[in-house]
Amino acid sequence: MRHGNLPAELNQFVGRESELAELVCLLNDARLVTVVGVGGVGKTRFASHGAAKLQERYCDGVWLAELSTVRDPDLLEHALAEALGLTDHTSRSPRDALLAHLEERRLLLVLDGFEQLVDACAELVRELLRGAPHLQVLAVGRRPLRIDGESTFPLAPMVDTDAVRLFADRAAAGQPSFRLTGGNLPHVRELCRRLDGIPLALELAAGRTGALSVEQLLQRLDDRFRLLTGGSRGALPRHQTLRTAIGWSHELCTSEQRLLWARLSVFSGQFDLEAVEYICGGPDLPAEQILDVLGELLAQSLVVPEDGPAGRRYRMLDTVREYGGEWLAATGDTDRLRRRHRDWYLGLATWCELDWFSPRQSEVAARIDSELPNLRTAMECSLEFPGDEHLAQYLAGTLWFYWAGCGRLSEGRHWLVQVLEAESSRDTSRLKALWVLGYVAVLQGDAVAAVAALQECLEEAEQAGDATAAAYALHRTGCLALVTDDMERAEQLMRQAIARYGEIGELNSNVLMAQVELAMAVAFRGDVPQAAAICEEVVAVCEDHGERWTLAYALYVLGYAHWTRGEMGRSRELLTECLVINHAFNDLLGTVLALEVLALVTLEEGDATEAALLQGAAERIWPSVGLPLFGSAYYSGPHVLCEERAREELGDGSYERIRREGALLEADDAVARAVHGPLRRENPPAPAPQGARGRRVDVVLKASESPELRPDQRA
């Protein structure tokens, strides 16, 4: 008697160990498990391999019914009977014969490719499970059956390591000389990423390695549907080319689903329901129907849900999106949809800039993080359409809070430079992009670029009578003076900018940051109490508005001020809060500045070893920000003092060894170490005596002014 009909595997099954374990667990508890996923993701092979591993569990075997070629619902029972090897010469209906055959048997029935018969298949499976108590069904399709008792197993694309292993295995099978090497591994990883980790696409690409190198494959992926053909002759027709695999899903969609699929192709990365309703809706697809149509695309695994800090969002695999893009182009509606997409994200960026000055800063940061691919696409769109260049400038400038506040200085500068190269007739958008570019260049320590952008902005703003742009240009010029050690000019410009902000009624995170930067200039000029008073006012306003980002910098100055007074406990408390906030926003500049002063506080508390380690951790972060400590003698003061005293206590050799150890810490680990410490401080050292406090302030100010620290300032 036959014990099943699973085909023997002709090549090695690669990866998916954790998914297989999860499938086994589901089959321990559920009588119906449905493996769902997008075309080409490897559902059939995965389910067959998992079923084969479980054959000993079923005394009556594991049986595979391939249903993809069945179109007539009336033939469904016949197809199952044929797969089970069941012959019946009686006048019973095929369904009754199936029920009689399965009634007392303990077997696993694998149903593959039922999508085109989903309603008929669901009804039949429900009846079989009710009539055959020992039957289990493992269904494999692009959507669930949606019947009681069903456990759905969404099969995702392969993780990076498995995808690389699969590609290498299949490439070596067709080209025995193929090996993964240090030279080709980065290209293989990039290829696997761009193919979304879809096994069918990886195997088809591997089949091309006899004629093309991996680098050449990457270059040709813009036309992936023409490139990725020529699957195994023994494979099912829908598995022989990538286009056919995706096209099979397209054929199973209704006209509304196809239309939404095509329109969703204008998105990049994740998107949310509100964006879909606005961008994709229209007379032929009313917004109120979109949720239901999107739900069907989700059920067919053409769209996948993703939950994150920004809430429930959706995404299409690049391969699915490109297929939809071809259909959208065929309708001639691509440009209209791209502009509609652009307009939505212009509005989103505007709202987020306004909401940045509110208790929702963290939500705004998470939202922009998740929307960044779409915002990039919106800028590209504006640059491509003649006459829309000012919208790209507006968008790049509006995102200043993200570039400066969320650790994206480098990308921000890339976009700002690019959009400013385009001609634009809209002065307001251009001026904003100019002062934001100057601001980013200041934070990166690039004084030359900062001066050029800010001077151009200030001159053009005054000519155009744009008081707002002039105030921001003046402010950021003062910021440049601050980090280049011209404290008198920094204080003068900051006070002028703050006065202009008051005249135009401007109040936001930038305005408060101008006050914090004024406090820094005042502190560096020796009036630490006045600096602290300014920042206390900033803290009060931040708390009133729920602002956290500028608050962190005010806490940095206050932490420094309490250090000068010898109040180590309070200084640590303020600097720790500053560090936690900046790290949450991924603001590397604020993070590393706080680490530098915390290292000095740690030294004052009697732990030179930990201070040296934190200095090493800060050293690792600076290259990702810009010029370490801006190349400023004033900002370097705490660092220089901490290093000198730590070297005295530890010796040069031990200091260097510990500093190098700290430089091995990742940013997350460094922050955790600074916040929680290596050990709990049960008995923190007593505050330094009053005389030592006075010396401490004097040493830092003198170190800041010392010509030895700045060779370029030597007389």
Image: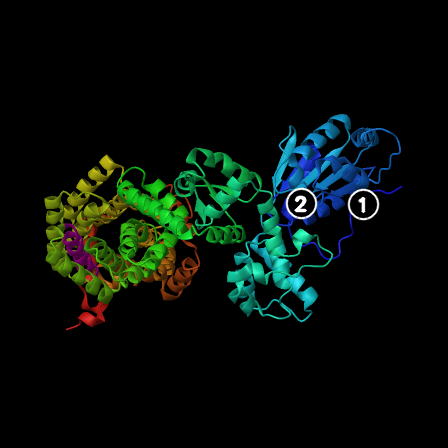
Residue that numbered label 2 is attached to: 20
Residue furthest top as drawn? 130
Mark 2 and mark 1 in contact (Cβ < 8 Å)? no
Q: What's the residue type where badge 1 is placed?
A: Asn
Q: What's the residue type where badge 2 is placed?
A: Leu
559 left or right of 110 in image: left
Along the viewing direction, whichever of 515 and 249 lies nearer the viewer: 249
On residue 683, which mark appears?
A: none
Q: Give the x, y percent position of residue 419.
A: 29, 60
On residue 5, which mark appears?
A: 1
Quadrant (top left/top right/bottom left/bottom right) for the C terminus = bottom left
CA separation in Å, label 1 and label 2: 20 Å
Image height of 708 relative to 94, above or below? below
Along the viewing direction, whichever of 438 and 531 lies nearer the viewer: 438
Residues in magenta?
Answer: 468-483
Dot 2 lies on which element? helix
Disc 1 versus disc 2: nearer the observer: 1
The way the protein has been coloured in the rendering is rainbow
Q: Give the x, y percent position of residue 692.
A: 21, 52
Quadrant of residue 297 in the image?
top right
Q: Earlier in the sequence, mark 1 or mark 2?
A: 1
454 left or right of 86 in image: left
Residue furthest bottom as drawn? 715
Within 10 Å of the Cα at label 1, are there few (<14), some (14-19), or many (20+) other Cα atoms? some
Dot 1 lies on which element? loop
Q: Is residue 475 magenta?
A: yes
In this rendering, does residue 512 appear at all? yes
Q: Does the magenta stretch include residue 639?
A: no
Quadrant (top left/top right/bottom left/bottom right) for the N terminus = top right
